[in-house]
């Protein structure tokens, strides 16, 4: 069972379509992008759905592992492979399929808080690869510079 299935189990999102609706596992969704008045849901196994929904109404249906990183995009933290700062100090998130999203400046703090919360929730005992101590004081190391060596707890 992969990490996303441990987080979500068999939870599904109901996506309305012209001829009915489709259920999609949360764990299969990488990201959701708004292209008013539609949204596009992209994910694993070439998942690509278009629905006549607003990003706001959909955000309320998603579990806590999803994050609205800017006005038109919601990402699934389970499929974030890395994040980086560009020259102009703009934060970018890279998804497992290589797609990049900007995190708006006003959402950066919430992004790092959620990232830290989800990490500590899924990996409560962490060895920091910078200081080689278990449960080190993360406040001493800038969050964007932390590199973790982790094993999921059973």
Image (cartoon, rainbow, N blue to C red):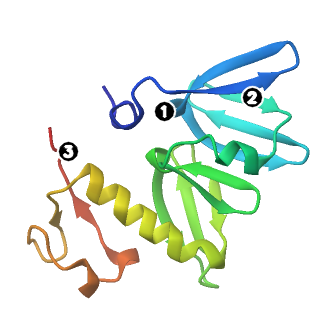
Residue highlighted by disc 2:
49
Residue highlighted by disc 1:
27
Q: Position of residue 132 (x, y in %)?
A: 10, 71
Q: Position of residue 33 (x, y in %)?
A: 74, 47
Q: Residue 19 occupies which quadrant of the picture?
A: top right
The answer for how far apart the CA atoms under marks 3 and 1 are is 17 Å
Looking at the image, residue 133 sits to the left or right of residue 57; the answer is: left
Tell me if label 2 and label 3 are in contact, CB under 8 Å.
Answer: no
The answer for how far apart the CA atoms under marks 2 and 1 are is 15 Å
Looking at the image, residue 149 sits to the left or right of residue 45; the answer is: left
Tell me if label 3 and label 1 are in contact, CB under 8 Å.
Answer: no
Count all numbered tags in the image, as a single digit.
3
Residue at 80% across / 41% down in the picture?
A: 39
Query: Closer to the camera, 19 or 30?
Result: 19
Residue at 81% across / 45% down in the picture?
A: 54
> Which disc is residue 152 wearing?
3
> Which disc is residue 54 wearing?
none
Q: Residue 129 occupies which quadrant of the picture?
A: bottom left
Q: Position of residue 43 (x, y in %)?
A: 60, 34
Residue at 45% across / 59% down in the picture?
A: 82
Looking at the image, residue 112 sits to the left or right of residue 14; the answer is: left
């Amino acid at each position: 069972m992969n990490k996303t299935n441990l987080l979500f189990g068999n939870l599904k999102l109901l996506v309305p379509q012209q001829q009915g609706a489709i259920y999609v596992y949360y764990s299969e969704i990488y990201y959701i992008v708004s292209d008013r008045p539609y949204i596009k849901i992209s994910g694993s196994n070439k998942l690509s759905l278009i629905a006549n929904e607003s990003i706001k109404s959909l955000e309320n249906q998603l579990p806590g592992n999803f994050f609205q990183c800017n006005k038109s995009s919601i990402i699934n933290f389970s499929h974030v492979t890395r994040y980086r700062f560009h020259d102009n100090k703009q934060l970018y998130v890279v998804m497992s399929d290589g797609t990049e999203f900007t995190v708006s400046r006003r959402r950066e703090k919430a992004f790092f808080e959620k990232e830290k919360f989800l990490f500590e929730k899924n990996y409560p005992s962490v060895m920091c690869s910078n200081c080689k101590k278990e449960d080190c004081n993360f406040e001493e190391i800038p969050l964007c510079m932390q590199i973790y060596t982790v094993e999921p707890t059973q």
